[in-house]
Amino acid sequence: FYRSAPLACVGGSFSGKGGHNPIEAAQCGCAVLTGPDMSNFTDVAAEMTSAGALRRCADAEALATEIETLLATPAELAAMQQAALAVTAPPGKALGSILAELAPLFAKAGVRCA
C-alpha cells in the first residue's frame, strides 16, 4: 500500500501509543506524517524530521492541513518523498551492518561470515 501512496500517516502517534515504525513508509517513497507522540521511535523520527522526510501534526486538523498542503504543492511533496528515500537505508545496508556486528560472535563459534 505504501508504494501506491504519495504520503502516509503513521498510526499510534495521535493516541499516546508512541507511534508505529515510519521507516517502512519512507523506504517506499512516502512523505511521512505523524501525530505528536513518536516516543517509540524518538531517534528515527528526529532524524527523519531533520532530513525533511517527516512532519509531526498536533492533531487531526493539523494533519488534514498538511495533507492538503502537500497534495496542492507537488514540488514540496516530491522533496519530502526524496528526503524519505535518502534518509532510510537502502535494502541490504542494514543486513551488512548487522552481520558486521555479529561477525566476532560467529568467529568464536567457528562460523565464517562473508
Image (cartoon, rainbow, N blue to C red):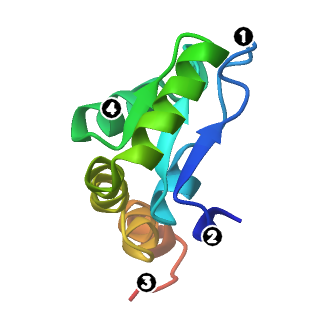
The CA distance from mark 2 to mark 3 is 37 Å
Compare residues 7 and 15 and report the one nearer the observer: 7
Marker disc for residue 49: 4
Distance of label 2 from label 4 (alpha carbons): 22 Å
Which residue has dot 1 on it?
A: 16
The x, y position of residue 79, in whole percent, is 26, 53
Q: Secondary structure at mark 1?
A: loop
Tell which of 13 and 78 is nearer to you. 78
- Which numbered marker is on residue 113? 3
96 or 111, which is in the foreground?
Answer: 96
Judging by the rendered image, the residue that carries numbered circle 2 is 4
- Residue 16 in the image, given as x and y percentages of width and height: 72, 10
- Marks 4 and 1, the one that precedes in the sequence: 1
Residue type, label 4:
Thr
Q: Earlier in the sequence, mark 4 or mark 3?
A: 4
Mark 3 neighbour density, 10 Å: few (under 14) some (14–19) many (20 or more): few
| Residue 75 visible in the shown view | yes
